[in-house]
Amino acid sequence: MGREVGHGLSWLGFFEEMPEPRQKAKVLYPLPELLLCCLVGVLCGAEGWVEVEEYCEAKLDFLRRFLPFEHGIASHDTFSDVFNALDAERFKAAFIAWTAALQENIREIVAVDGKTLRRSFDRGCGRGPIHMISAWAAGQRLVLGQLAVPAKENEITAIPELLALLSLKGAIVTIDAIGCQEKIAAAIRERGADYLLALKDNQPTLYRDVADFLIEQRAAGFKDCAAGSWATCQTTDADHGRVEVRRHWITSDIAWLRERHPQWLDLVSIAMIEAERQEPGKPASRQTRYYIGSIAADAAEFAHAARQHWGIENGLHWVLDVILREDECRIRKRNGPANFATIRHMTLNLLQRTTTAKKKSVRVKRGLAALDETFLQAVIMAA
């Protein structure tokens, strides 16, 4: 765990070794104070450096409960200069070390997915918008880590780099079809985790073999599979008149498939989901999805993992866009966008961790943080 800093803000201890981009003799606003300001500002509604300065000016007496702030609150230009220059890789590594200390020892579903920070482009430098890969612990609702995809690369090369930074032992890592790659499956197993990868025709031969076999066996009641080697279950969701029925099948009787595709490390099972959705006034829609995995043929575990994967959309991406307004952020210079994205993830983790107003939504908690200093203090001391 991190060392205590200030009045119980143990999470700041994970950032103590950050290399300081400023000349030490000229520093009026220490990095822990700037980081605390950024976090409190974003908790209270800030979407950029000017708002961080304004919120923290109003909260100066509150902030002095934790750190001295001998020179008051830094200007927005100081925040911009420091976080633009701060090493994004070291900052991300400190964040990941902190979240690793928060993780509970449970059989966690870790969803990995990408998201573009739409307004993070910098035309003056010829740089397009930043694309971030994030890992989301669905059960604990924690951002475990994130990685900016280099400009000339893609998610396929970035995902193994992110996985190598995370503590994943015992987890089930779920990724959509772009991550269905032999090297990614191997990287997950090397981290002591299982994989469940969505399968589409970007792996044409494997996709055709899996789909043909599962369609055939489903029609035949899996009569060609050994007893106990397959399982099925059905789940139903109903909300606002929409009803979705999902039927799941999974089998581990795939020795023939491993012989045909030996490059897939520890391939244990293949699976399919047939999802049928009915909405008021619309014709029913049906979609079939296929998966490969290193998990056993347990239909309930498969259904849970596949469903939890989509939690990254609602629990992380939607919250970042709608509640924290990530896509509207105009921070663009140098390391600023990546570092501010890390601060948003820290904010979200602390909001999820606090036991005060535990059942409230992130939107409500953020509003409470802006209005109630007792609640704000509970949030920033939540880890």
Image (cartoon, rainbow, N blue to C red):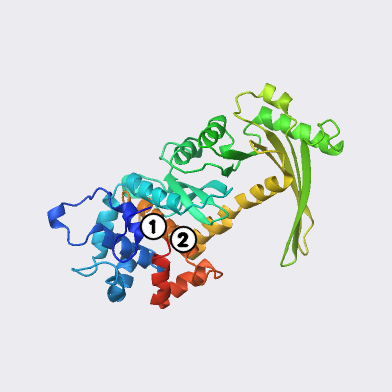
Q: Which mark is residue 343?
A: 1
- The answer to whether 203 appears left or right of 12 in the picture is right
- Residue 310 lies, in percent from the top left, at 61, 52
Query: Amino acid under label 1?
Result: Ile
Label 1 secondary element: helix
- At 46% from the left and 73% from the top, the residue drawn is 367
Above or below residue 331? Residue 299 is above
Where does residue 195 sit, x and y in percent of width and height? 60, 39
Q: Residue 313 lies in what quarter of the image? A: bottom right
- Compared across the picture, whether 97 is left or right of 267 comes to left
Residue 3: % across, % down: 32, 55
At horizontal 65% and vertical 47% (from top left) the residue drawn is 306
- Which mark is on residue 348? 2
In the image, is 33 to the left or to the right of 249? Answer: left
Density class for disc 1 (Cα within 10 Å; few <14, some 14-19, many ≥20) is many
Is residue 94 at all visible to an observer of this figure? yes
Q: Residue 260: give x, y in percent of width and height.
A: 68, 22
Residue closest to the eye, 144 or 330: 144
